[in-house]
Image (cartoon, rainbow, N blue to C red):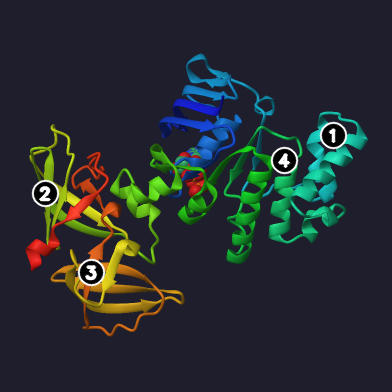
Amino acid sequence: MNAIELRQIHVHVQQKHILKGIDLTVEEGDFVTLLGPSGCGKTTLLRTIAGLQKLNEGTVVISGNKVADGNLAYHLDPAKRGVSLVFQSYALWPHMTVFDNVAFGLQVRKQPKAGIRKSVMAALDKMRIPELADRYPGELSGGQQQRVAIARAIVTSPSILLLDEPLSNLDAKLRTEMRAELKRLHRELGTTIIYVTHDQHEAITLSTKVAVFFGGELVQADTPRELYRHPRTLQVADFMGSSDHPLNRVEGMCRTSGGECTVSTALGSFRLAGMDDGAEEAAAVVLTVRPEDVVLHETRTAGSIPVKVEDVLPAGGETLVRVAYGQEKLGARVIGDPDYAPGRMLYASFREERINLYDRETGRRLETGVTTITPILEEIHR
Ligand SMILES: Nc1ncnc2c1ncn2[C@@H]1O[C@H](COP(=O)(O)OP(=O)(O)OP(=O)(O)O)[C@@H](O)[C@H]1O
């Protein structure tokens, strides 16, 4: 059974159309991240699932039960949805000890005292903080408070855990540590987790599935690998990259005949097999390749083009080498610390299966059904 099914969710807040027709299926045990820039509607969607935000259209089904239906103005109470929400701000009660903060949800349900003690200590153990039980939130670090907030969310054994940017208030080192903790927790509990972040690195590290949002629309929901390797739009491709290693974009023209397409660019030509018969005769396209998929060679190899080193930016274990082929600039991400002086001539080739092609006008990936794109650079530049 699916853990969550969202169908055609529309949410308006103060006459602003915030969520625009969201369809998303979350399977049991998934770790799904809602990813996108600030203001794209991630928190609003999480609150809609939790029942803290009413929807105008569409349905939310949790564990097979319909909990919201916009057309019937039906919204099940948040407490009855079987979900637990952890806020970005932790929202711990400052006048209560850690134990009481975590116990609160069980006390409200009037569970027996001995059972409560056992469940609270089990949750604190899971978060590796049993020694903090008698402290007050004001006596804890940010990372410890975050652990308490998560312990409070898991103590009731919810079937679904909703986490809203839970690591954003932590410093970089603690964030990395807590990421590993969340991954462990997900593995141990097997709970379905929906996680909100604007950090693509975090999304890729943690998730089984990532849903990318822009402007209230869900653009692509996929495994982290698919999303990184085959982004559906140029916008997603850019967002999934890192600002230190921006995506390489090369403009060109795509000409199709007989199910085969030749893309001509300033770097040379590429051949794609398996184009749809209905594909455009000639279309302006953008070819993309990530810097780690540009391979530099010191001597000429098959399918490579001669390039001139412009800049070398070492970053410890890896180096970004910026090269030029005529007017086209390319970034290559190289493991290690190569000693390339600016002006030196090298040869560049691409990992063909990692090249993507987009319609320049719409920004949509050309769904060619091909798995490989063959560069025919050599023929051009011999
Ligand atoms: N109560 C509200 N009143 C008015 N506008 C709101 C309200 N809540 C959200 N919005 C607007 O809805 C849009 C989506 O907000 P939301 O918080 O869901 O985005 P987000 O993607 O989670 O952003 P962030 O990463 O900054 O938290 C934003 O433009 C925001 O200004």
The structure residue drawn at horizontal position 45% and vertical position 47%, both measured from the top left corner, is 224
Closest to the observer, 210 or 58: 210
Residue type of the residue flagged with mark 4: Ile
Work out whether mark 4 precedes mark 1 in sequence or the reverse, and give the earlier one. Answer: 1
- Establish if 106 lies above or below 308: above
- Occupied quadrant, residue 116: top right
Real-space Cα distance between discs 2 and 4? 55 Å
Image quadrant in which the N terminus is located: top right
Real-space Cα distance between discs 3 and 2? 20 Å
Which residue, given by chain and number where applicable, does mark 4 sit on?
A: 154
Q: Is residue 96 visible?
A: no
Question: Under tag 4, what secondary structure?
Answer: helix
The answer to the question of whether label 3 and label 4 lie on touching residues, with beta carbons closer than 8 A, is no
Which residue, given by chain and number where applicable, does mark 2 sit on?
A: 262
Q: Is residue 81 visible?
A: yes
Work out whether mark 3 precedes mark 1 in sequence or the reverse, and give the earlier one. Answer: 1
The x and y percentages for residue 187 are 64, 45
Residue type of the residue flagged with mark 2: Thr
Which residue, given by chain and number where applicable, does mark 3 sit on?
A: 348
Work out whether mark 2 precedes mark 4 in sequence or the reverse, and give the earlier one. Answer: 4
Residue 107: mark: 1
